[in-house]
Image (cartoon, rainbow, N blue to C red):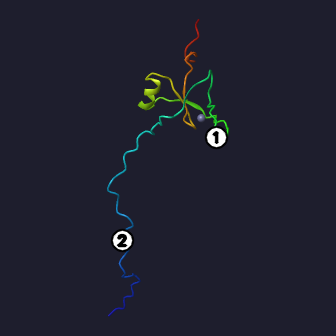
Amino acid sequence: MAEETTPQSTTPAAPPPAPPAAAAPAPATEAAVPVEQKLKVRKPRQRSCDEKDAKGKLCAGHLKRWYDYPKEVVARIGNDTEIYRCEFCKTLYKPDPKQMPHSFTLRY
Ligand SMILES: [Zn+2]
């Protein structure tokens, strides 16, 4: 009779920590734009955000052309509006209606 000294413990293994979640979380959608999101008019040649935070520090985020804005935003600014959004504080900027877009050649 061979002596088998198995180091394996005979105590039952602990049950797995957590069963797989049955309900999958809802698919992530585009970040909802809060209704109170600021909408400002861009100053002529303004390229960076001039919002200030609670401490009065200038945001200075880059204003980026925003193309795929959600319909909540369309409802506020219209469908065909050129819109810019601050990369930091997400403030929306509409172009100054009095200012011609840069892509147009000035011809008076
Ligand atoms: Zn900003």
The answer to which image quadrant residue 3 occupies is: bottom left
- The residue identified by callout 1 is 54
- The residue identified by callout 2 is 15
Tell me the SS state at disc 1: loop
Residue drawn at x 61%, y 31% is: 49
- Badge 1 residue CB within 8 Å of ligand 1: no
- Front residue of 8/102: it is 102
Q: Position of residue 57 (x, y in %)?
A: 67, 38
Q: Answer above or below: position of 43 versus 105.
A: below
Tell me the SS state at disc 2: loop
What's the residue type where badge 2 is placed? Pro
- Front residue of 103/95: it is 95
- Front residue of 42/35: it is 35
- Badge 2 residue CB within 8 Å of ligand 1: no
Q: Position of residue 71 (x, y in %)?
A: 41, 30
Q: Sequence order check: which comes first, mark 2 or mark 1?
A: 2
Looking at the rendering, in which quadrant would you find the C terminus? top right
Inter-mark Cα distance, 2 to 1: 50 Å
Q: Residues within 10 Å of mark 2 (few under 14, many from 20)?
A: few
Ligand 1 is found in which quarter of the picture? top right
Residue drawn at x 61%, y 23% is: 43
- Front residue of 24/12: it is 24
Q: How many marks?
A: 2
What's the residue type where badge 1 is placed? Ala
Q: Position of residue 17 (x, y in %)?
A: 39, 67
Residue drawn at x 50%, y 23% is: 82
Residue drawn at x 57%, y 20% is: 96
